[in-house]
Image (cartoon, rainbow, N blue to C red):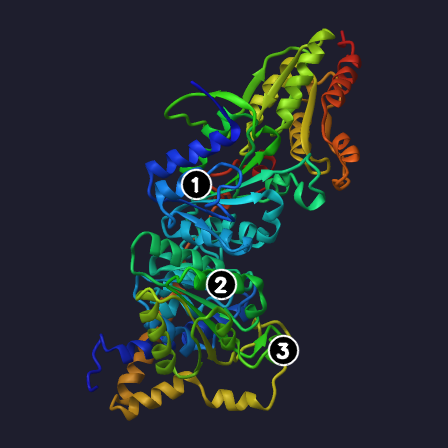
């Protein structure tokens, strides 16, 4: 075990997969200059052909990753900030998500599109998106959104090895957090969630950095005698619905914490899954703690309160536990 | 040339153009009869563009096309049975019944898709060329797109990427004079799409799209250049589509001007047939080819008609490598 940061985990995963398989290469905006520290020393180690700086042309180079994947390569695209996926919606949704299907299985697109969730630091609305739920509505894209270094490394390695296209959403609020990461071959299968903390009164399902806020809230709730279980789906597509349902059937209460905007968020999908499948186990309404449906302002004074916070989660937990219903005789 | 044997490339060009023409004539007829669902975008009039370009490619070279997808795979040498079966939505179709008329794409022939989002093949082509280069393969990737697609950012991004990385790519703009109902002159700034090559620092070539030999020569030069590591070329084939944007739509959307008759007089198959006869090929030989192709088309249609439709569960295949879950309530009503 070694203690490394989330960003180091990304770096190690890329490094190990590029060493293992010469079909893996990285391209994106300014990857050679190593903006965020995920490609340290890569040009020297792998050469400029496999570590490619692209024009500022997201639709072009993300689509090109699709084309390269179709002819046998395994590209990792560094699209930097997730807001920059929007110019590439055409290639992501019409080519990358659909080619395997439209052509009846003839096309194979093993590629990873990495981007970060760059919110909470006064970057204003166009640089602060958390758009994973928009892509959850598009079949054909697997989606990972890890909350800690260990999961980040294991999931990114699995994503690179997957024969399906994977979008990796990397929460910048997790970047500098250190975590114990197993040495050597550390792979976490896509679609497998994790219980980050066991509890019995309420299940808090966190998404991406929302997991860490939920864990802090769980500690605070412990002081009040409320035992919270924290679930991290880790992968949003496919979603580990069974793990979530098992936990909710045990606790009878659920709160979904998601830094995305509320409407049609991952939290919405998780809530619907719970209500549809575990209604009989519920002892209170399922609540969402999300970012409200307004844009993100520049001024920190009004930006910060918009995201899920420990206080909002604690309030939500008090509400669902406080409304504990008497079981019918 | 006096040879008229099976491997005579001149006859192969004729054969592929005829194959497209007859395949589509049959498809248009059975579409009118209601046997083919959805829209049918025909390639008639443009056969020399596709066949000329593909004759300059090797079997293992890559090709990306568009929604007007019937001509490209046949031009590249694909067999007709899976193509016709696809038009009828059958399981034996080249895309297992998932693609249909806008997506006739035979990956075994180097195709990487025929995409119905106009212009979206540009980045894919650049990426396939990059993939070939990174793997040390001396393959090229060719992108067919229309004059309409030339206004899409994706085409620009694909060409810029291919040029800046000196990739083995060829961009063939099939300028058929209309983007759906809109004349090219109302939609495309500048006289020629090929002139835009100058902005990328790559060759831009204009070629008579009704002359299969001229298209082949232009593309061959571009392919040689690409294979030699000298980067992409933009070629504009000036051609003409006979049919409406899609056929059997009830009313004609394409505004035909007086030049329509001139274009039909310059039919690519008629021009090439005449050239072959002048070169010593007999009418009888060409008629025999026409007859053989009519038989191939009839065989393909019979095969398609005899084939099964996909079963409902297959709608859930190939979203991912593994089948996605089938909701029980949907299954119950399927």
Query: Considering only order in the chain, which callout, 1 or 2, is on the residue closer to the N terminus?
Result: 2
Q: Are marks 1 and 3 on the same chain?
A: yes
Can you give x and y, in whole percent of width and height, for residue B56 in the image? 32, 72
- Indicate the secondary structure of the residue bearing disc 3: loop
Query: Considering only order in the chain, which callout, 2 or 3, is on the residue closer to the N terminus?
Result: 2
Labels 3, 2: front one? 2
Find out whether the residues at labels 2 and 1 contact each other: C-beta distance under 8 Å: no
* Residue receiving disc 1: B321
> The numbered mark 2 sits on a residue in which chain?
B
Q: Are marks 2 and 1 on the same chain?
A: yes
Q: Could you say which quadrant of the image residue B137 lies in? A: bottom left
Can you give x and y, in whole percent of width and height, for residue B94 in the image? 41, 57
* Res. B160 mark: 2
Residue B244 left/right relative to B163: right
- Indicate the secondary structure of the residue bearing disc 2: helix
* Residue receiving disc 3: B252
Q: Residues within 10 Å of mark 3 (few under 14, many from 20)?
A: some
- Indicate the secondary structure of the residue bearing disc 1: loop
Labels 1, 3: front one? 1
Q: Residues within 10 Å of mark 1 (few under 14, many from 20)?
A: some
Find out whether the residues at labels 3 and 2 contact each other: C-beta distance under 8 Å: no
- Viewer-proximal residue among B63 and B268: B63
Query: Considering only order in the chain, which callout, 3 or 1, is on the residue closer to the N terminus?
Result: 3
* Res. B29 mark: none
Can you give x and y, in whole percent of width and height, for residue B214 in the image? 37, 82
Q: Are marks 3 and 2 on the same chain?
A: yes
Q: Is residue A147 above or below residue B21?
A: above
Q: Is residue A231 above or below residue B8?
A: above
> The numbered mark 3 sits on a residue in which chain?
B
């Amino acid at each position: 075990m070694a203690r490394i940061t989330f960003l180091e985990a990304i770096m190690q995963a890329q490094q190990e997969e590029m060493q293992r398989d010469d079909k893996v290469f990285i391209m994106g905006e300014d990857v050679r200059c190593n903006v965020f520290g995920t490609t340290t020393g890569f040009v020297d180690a792998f050469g400029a052909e496999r570590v490619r700086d692209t024009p500022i042309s997201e639709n072009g180079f993300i689509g090109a990753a699709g084309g390269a994947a179709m002819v046998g390569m395994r590209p990792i695209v560094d699209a930097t900030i997730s807001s920059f996926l929007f110019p590439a919606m055409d290639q992501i949704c019409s080519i990358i998500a659909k080619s395997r299907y439209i052509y009846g299985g003839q096309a194979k697109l093993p590629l990873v599109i990495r981007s970060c969730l760059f919110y909470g630091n006064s970057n204003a609305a166009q640089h602060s998106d958390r758009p994973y739920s928009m892509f959850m509505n598009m079949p054909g894209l697997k989606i990972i959104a890890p909350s800690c270094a260990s999961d980040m490394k294991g999931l990114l390695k699995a994503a690179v090895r997957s024969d399906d296209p994977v979008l990796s959403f990397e929460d910048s609020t997790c970047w500098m957090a250190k975590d114990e990461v197993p040495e050597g071959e550390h792979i976490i299968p896509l679609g497998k969630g994790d219980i980050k903390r066991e509890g019995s009164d309420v299940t808090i399902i966190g998404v991406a950095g929302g997991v860490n806020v939920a864990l802090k809230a769980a500690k605070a709730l412990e002081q009040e005698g409320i035992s919270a279980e924290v679930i991290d789906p880790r992968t949003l597509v496919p979603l580990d619905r069974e793990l979530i349902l098992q936990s909710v059937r045990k606790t009878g209460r659920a709160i979904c914490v998601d830094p995305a905007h509320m409407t049609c968020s991952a939290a919405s999908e998780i809530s619907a899954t719970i209500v549809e499948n575990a209604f009989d186990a519920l002892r209170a309404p399922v609540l969402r703690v999300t970012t409200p449906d307004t844009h993100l302002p520049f001024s920190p004074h009004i930006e910060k309160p918009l995201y899920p916070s420990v206080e909002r989660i604690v309030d939500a937990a008090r509400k669902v536990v406080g409304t504990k219903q008497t079981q019918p005789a | 040339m006096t040879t008229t044997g099976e491997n005579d490339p001149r006859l192969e060009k004729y054969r592929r153009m005829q194959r497209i023409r007859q395949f589509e004539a049959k498809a248009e007829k059975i579409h009118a009869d209601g046997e083919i669902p959805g829209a049918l975008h025909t390639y008639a009039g443009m056969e020399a563009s596709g066949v000329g370009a593909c004759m300059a490619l090797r079997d293992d070279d890559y090709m990306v096309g568009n929604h007007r997808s019937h001509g490209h795979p046949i031009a590249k040498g694909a067999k007709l049975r899976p193509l016709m079966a696809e038009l009828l939505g059958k399981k034996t179709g080249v895309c297992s019944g998932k693609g249909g008329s806008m997506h006739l794409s035979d990956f075994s022939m180097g195709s990487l898709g025929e995409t119905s989002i106009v212009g979206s093949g540009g980045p894919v082509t650049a990426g396939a060329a990059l993939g070939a280069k990174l793997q040390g393969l001396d393959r090229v990737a060719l992108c067919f797109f229309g004059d309409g697609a030339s206004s899409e950012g994706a085409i620009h991004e694909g060409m810029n990427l291919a040029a800046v990385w000196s990739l083995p790519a060829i961009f063939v703009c099939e300028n058929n004079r209309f983007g759906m109902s809109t004349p090219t002159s109302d939609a495309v700034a500048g006289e020629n799409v090929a002139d835009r090559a100058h902005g990328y620092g790559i060759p831009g070539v204009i070629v008579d799209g009704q002359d299969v030999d001229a298209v082949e020569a232009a593309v061959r030069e571009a392919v040689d250049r690409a294979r030699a590591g000298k980067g992409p070329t933009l070629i504009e084939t000036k051609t003409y589509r006979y049919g409406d944007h899609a056929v059997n739509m009830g009313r004609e959307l394409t505004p035909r001007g007086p030049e329509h008759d001139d274009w039909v007089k310059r039919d690519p198959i008629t021009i090439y047939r005449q050239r072959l006869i002048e070169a010593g090929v007999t009418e009888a030989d060409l008629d025999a080819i026409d007859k053989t192709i009519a038989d191939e088309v009839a065989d393909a249609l019979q095969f398609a008609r005899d084939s099964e439709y996909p079963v409902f569960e297959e709608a859930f295949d190939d979203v991912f490598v593994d089948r996605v879950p089938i909701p029980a309530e949907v299954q119950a009503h399927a």
